[in-house]
Amino acid sequence: MEHESGTGTGELSADEYAEFMELAAQEGFDTDEVAADLTGGGHAPLPVLAVVGRPNVGKSTLVNRILGRREAVVEDRPGVTRDRVSYEADWNGRRFRVVDTGGWEQDVLGIDASVAQQAEVAIEAADAVLFVVDAVVGATDTDQAVVRLLRKSGKPVVLAANKVDGPSGEADAAALWNLGLGEPYPVSALHGRGSGDLLDAVLSALPEAPQLDFAGAGQGGPRRIALIGRPNVGKSSMLNKLAGETRVVVDSTAGTTRDPVDELIELGGKTWKFVDTAGIRRRVHLTEGADYYASLRTAAALEKAEVAVVLIDVSEPLAEQDTRIVSMAVEAGRAVVLAYNKWDVLDEERRFYLEREIEKDLVQVRWAPRVNVSARTGRHLEKLVPAIETALEGWETRVPTGRLNGFLGELVAAHPHPIRGGKQPRILFGTQASTRPPRFVLFASGFLEAGYRRFVERRLREEFGFAGTPIDISVRVREKRSRRK
């Protein structure tokens, strides 16, 4: 089987790119869109902007304004934001990730602790912070508490004085100089006033390019592995067992770990960098908020990782949170290994039901290597390294363009797309635009249905492997030829 694994950059060569652009033009494709397909759309980490502030100051409205579309849920009461972690945005040609850090209700008891705990996680995960204050109300005690956290973090901060709908509100915005965070940018998230100047300031605060922890992996640097999973699944126990000593506090209380702990660990004759990404400490009155910020922490760890080892507690039925975390790893474009933990306590009856739960709920990641382990006893932990190496190999595999098009030609001839509306779309040609994860661009004569795309992905895996890695397939449809003369 002809393929390249882990060689070069995984991108198209200059000759391949030029050849494809010429072919696309001849076939009637929009060359600007083709160029974007071939050079962009990967899963490289983007700079992260955390939008923080107390409830109901307009954070989600401002996020929607930054995105240029209504995506974050907005309602005129505090604590509406719950599940969405981040969104991709761009301004003046620069892409970055926006994290809306709402999603929590304020409790009148322990307000300082709750604000500190939740804002701290959001700030820690970001490259820069957009601090939103209601200019009409002015700075409150809660705002002052967040300011102290921002100063302690050392992260670049842009101060947005929101709800300045006209010139009369400029004085309210100017009063926020007293916060000591520099110039307050007057803005109306609702109407868009001042948003351009605010975004220019945001770009100045964000790094030009994301720092890739795995950029030097090809030169022998340690590969970065994120241990992820829902609270109390055994992430810290596994890290300790792998390290051979107690590096992380382990407790039966879900969510003991508060800070990510990076550890260089020797396994299988190699050095790996493991990250324990357990969620923040759970409090009864902050359960939903804690879950939100635990997922935020997981997302931040995934941005910096190459491989996600997803731990699943086999002693309990698979939960929606398990499948959501697996989906986060897939959507982040990371290589994936499924580690079924606590295997030492599994009886035959539970094993029977577990296999059916896996078949039902994790069918979308059937390609991920699976290891059955016990972090407590160390059972089968030696199988973790081969599984990680398999996933990395699939993640970095590149199929040469000639070989890919030969495969696509045979596939279309043997299994053509179903006829719809009297027409039968077909794949004309394709290329693998990048690796880490493998990303394919297919050029077609018409729209390819989702079922046929899944069929193509399945056959790609059968032919070329790609174990342990998500595959991204985008389809570029040829424009209709103009009938005008």
Image: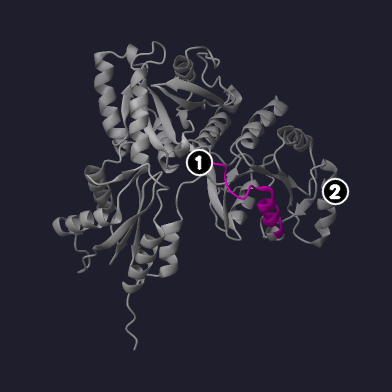
Q: Which quarter shows the C terminus?
A: bottom left
Q: Residue visible at 46% across and 29% down?
A: 228
Q: Is residue 202 located in the magenta-colored stretch of the structure?
A: yes
| Residue 107, position as x, y percentages in the image | 67, 29
- Residue 301 seen anywhere in this rendered image of the structure: yes
Q: Residue at x 48, y 21 (%)?
A: 265
Residue type at mark 2?
Answer: Ala
Q: What is the tally of numbered marks visible in this picture?
A: 2
Measured from the top left, where is residue 410 in percent x and y?
17, 56
Q: Which residue is mark 2?
A: 175
Is 19 in front, or is 24? 19
Label 1 residue SS:
loop
> Does 59 appear in magenta?
no
> In the displayed structure, would residue 426 be above or below residue 338?
below
Outermost residue, left side: 414
Q: Amino acid at mark 1?
A: Ala
Q: Which residues are magenta?
A: 197-212
Who is closer to the viewer here, 78 or 444?
444
Q: Nearer the viewer, residue 113 or 206?
A: 206
The residue that label 1 is drawn on is 215
Mark 2 surroundings within 10 Å by alpha-carbon count, few (fewer than 14), some (14 through 19), many (20 or more): some
